[in-house]
């Protein structure tokens, strides 16, 4: 029972982070106020996840591919951590 609840919490946390990355991508196409607390929160939470991927990939024709890799890595990480939780408990 504990493993199932812990796996749900981990899954929700990763999903929220993935949605925030998608939201950040959408915000990049919209003119917004960077000092808005909500937008600042989205950027502050997603930047530590996306920065390593941004350093790995060169910008291709002005397109940033780091969100795609970040979402893929988070999905894979989520699945691995959930499997590890069920294996341990």
Image: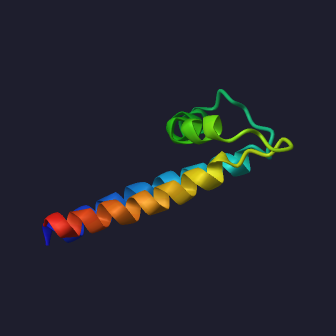
Position of 16 relative to 8 (above/below):
above
Q: Which residue shows up at 41% across the image and 57% down it?
A: 77
Quarter of image, res 11: bottom left
Residue at 79 percent across and 44 percent down: it is 30
Q: In this rendered view, identify the residue nearer to me: 58 or 70.
A: 58
Q: How many marks?
A: 0
Which residue extends farthest top? 35
Residue 19 appears in view? no
Q: Quadrant of the C terminus?
A: bottom left
Up/down of 44 relative to 8, above or below: above
Image position, residue 43 (x, y; %): 59, 36
Q: Nearer the viewer, residue 30 or 49?
A: 49
**Residue 27 in sight:** yes
Task: Describe residue 83's horizontal placement relative to residue 27 as left or right.
Answer: left
Location of residue 20 in the rendering, given as x and y in whole percent from the top left corner: 56, 50
Q: Residue 62 vs residue 42: left or right? A: right
For the rendered model, the colour scheme is rainbow
Q: Is residue 25 left or right of residue 88?
A: right
What residue appears at the point 51 percent right and 35 percent down from the top-left corner?
A: 48
Q: Residue 37 appears at what percent x and percent y?
A: 57, 32
Q: Residue at x 81, y 39 (%)?
A: 31
For the N terminus, give its image quadrant. Answer: bottom left
**Residue at the outermost right position:** 61
Residue 21, image x and y in percent?
59, 50
């Amino acid at each position: 029972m504990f493993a199932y609840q812990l796996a749900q919490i981990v899954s929700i946390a990763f999903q929220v982070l993935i949605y925030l990355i998608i939201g950040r991508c959408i915000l990049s196409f919209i003119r917004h106020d960077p000092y808005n607390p909500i937008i600042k929160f989205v950027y502050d939470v997603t930047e530590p996840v996306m920065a390593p991927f941004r350093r790995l990939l060169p910008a291709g024709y002005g397109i940033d591919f780091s969100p795609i890799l970040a979402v893929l890595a988070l999905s894979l990480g989520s699945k691995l951590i959930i499997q590890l939780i069920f294996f341990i408990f």
